Every structure is written in structure tokens, then in C-alpha cells.
Image (cartoon, rainbow, N blue to C red):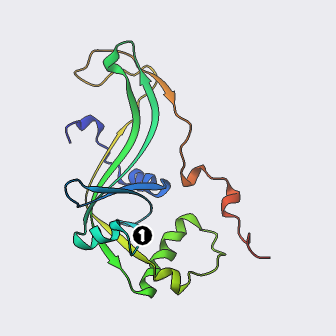
């Protein structure tokens, strides 16, 4: 990583970030350009759990080459200083190079989907996944082989990075983005569908 001062090496904080975020971007091999899609995901242990239709371009490209790159980010604040080159952003960013394991067997897909649902439906209390629905999708476990993470979080009045003209930043925080921790407790109310 060129900017060593931005390296984010705190694995427990990275895991907490990945568990909280909702959307990742997945790049697969294609010609002449990589093919990239946004996916909802669940992060477990050392892997991203995602899924897609069995019949689309994404599944086709994964079957051809299961080496993928996943990116997750969160913008935090706009940073401004008197000099034009000192306009920037605060952010978190994770890039993971992964190998995707595609699962097609009905039982494996249902198991995978139930693990993925723990993030979005921790209250349980939903009708189980039907075989017909499972037979329409590919369950994908993306095991991390390499990971790099960056964060740039400054305090009001903090100066620019080393080697740059000294200019104090002023922060303008973005409203909190969509994330699991941003939902109210009512989103996970037990017994909601017991009528």
C-alpha cells in the first residue's frame, strides 16, 4: 500500500465494519473489462456469503473463473481546507481478493442462505426457504486469500498528511449510511409474523 499512514490493520474493527455494512461490490473476470456487481452479503469468519441467480451473467463468469475481488466502503465526512488540493474525504475501505466456492445442491444452498439470513433476520420467525427457491440460485462462499484495508478518519483542525502543505481540515459529516446498526430495534422484533 503506497499510503502507509492510511493502512487499517485492526482486524477486530475491520470485522465489525464488514459485519455492519450491507453492500459489497464484486468484480469477476470478463473481457475486455472486468464485470462488477453490487451484492448484499454476510461476513462470517474469513468469508463473504453472497448469492445470485443460476441463470445470469454473474454466475456464468464465476463458473469460468472463481478468483474474484470484493470491495466494501463507507464515506464518513467531507474534508475542506483553504487550499484546493486539501479537499478530501474521510472513509473506510476494504478490498479482499477471494476464491469463490459455488454451491448448487438444494440442501447446501438452504444451509448457506440460513447462515446469510442471520445478519438480516436474527429474530428468526420466518417461513423456511423452499426447495424451489433454493434451486433457482447459486450460493457462493468467498474465502479471503488477501485483504487490504484503509481508513482516513481525522479530527477537526487536524493537518494534512505528511509531505503536503500544512492546512487545517474542517469536517462535514455525511448522514449515517445504510447499515445494520442504523436500524431500529423494531426491525428485529420477535414474533412479528405470528398471527
Which image quarter is the C terminus in? bottom right
Identify the residue at horizontal 57%, vertical 52% (top origin): 181
Looking at the picture, tell me which residue is in the foreground, 3 or 158. 3
Identify the residue at horizontal 59%, vertical 49% (top origin): 182
Identify the residue at horizontal 45%, vertical 79% (top origin): 136
Looking at the picture, tell me which residue is in the foreground, 45 or 73. 73
In the picture of the structure, the residue carrying the numbered disc 1 is: 52
- Quarter residue 124 falls in: bottom right
Identify the residue at horizontal 27%, vertical 67% (top origin): 61
**180 on left or right of 8:** right
- Quarter residue 192 falls in: bottom right
Vertical order, 126 against 178 (above or below)? below
Horizontal and vertical percent position of residue 39: 43, 59
Horizontal and vertical percent position of residue 1: 20, 42
Horizontal and vertical percent position of residue 70: 32, 57
**Residue at disc 1, secondary structure:** strand
Amino acid at each position: 500500500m503506497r499510503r502507509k499512514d492510511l493502512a487499517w490493520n485492526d482486524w477486530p474493527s475491520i470485522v465489525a465494519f464488514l459485519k455492519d455494512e450491507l453492500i459489497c461490490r464484486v468484480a469477476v473476470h470478463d473481457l475486455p473489462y472486468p464485470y462488477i456487481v453490487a451484492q448484499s452479503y454476510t461476513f462470517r469468519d474469513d468469508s463473504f456469503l453472497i448469492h445470485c441467480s443460476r441463470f445470469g451473467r454473474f454466475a456464468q463468469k464465476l463458473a469460468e473463473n472463481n478468483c474474484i475481488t470484493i470491495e466494501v466502503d463507507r464515506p464518513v465526512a467531507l474534508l475542506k481546507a483553504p487550499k484546493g488540493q486539501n479537499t478530501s474525504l474521510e472513509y473506510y475501505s476494504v478490498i479482499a481478493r477471494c476464491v469463490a466456492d459455488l454451491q448448487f445442491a438444494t440442501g447446501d444452498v438452504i444451509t448457506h442462505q440460513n447462515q446469510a439470513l442471520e445478519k438480516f433476520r436474527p429474530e428468526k420467525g420466518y417461513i423456511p426457504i423452499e426447495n424451489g427457491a433454493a434451486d433457482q440460485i447459486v450460493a457462493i462462499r468467498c474465502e479471503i486469500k488477501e485483504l487490504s484495508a484503509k481508513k482516513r478518519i481525522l479530527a477537526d483542525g487536524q493537518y494534512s498528511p505528511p509531505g503536503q502543505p500544512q492546512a487545517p481540515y474542517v469536517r462535514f459529516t455525511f448522514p449515517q449510511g445504510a447499515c445494520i446498526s442504523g436500524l431500529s430495534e423494531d426491525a428485529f422484533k420477535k414474533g412479528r409474523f405470528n398471527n
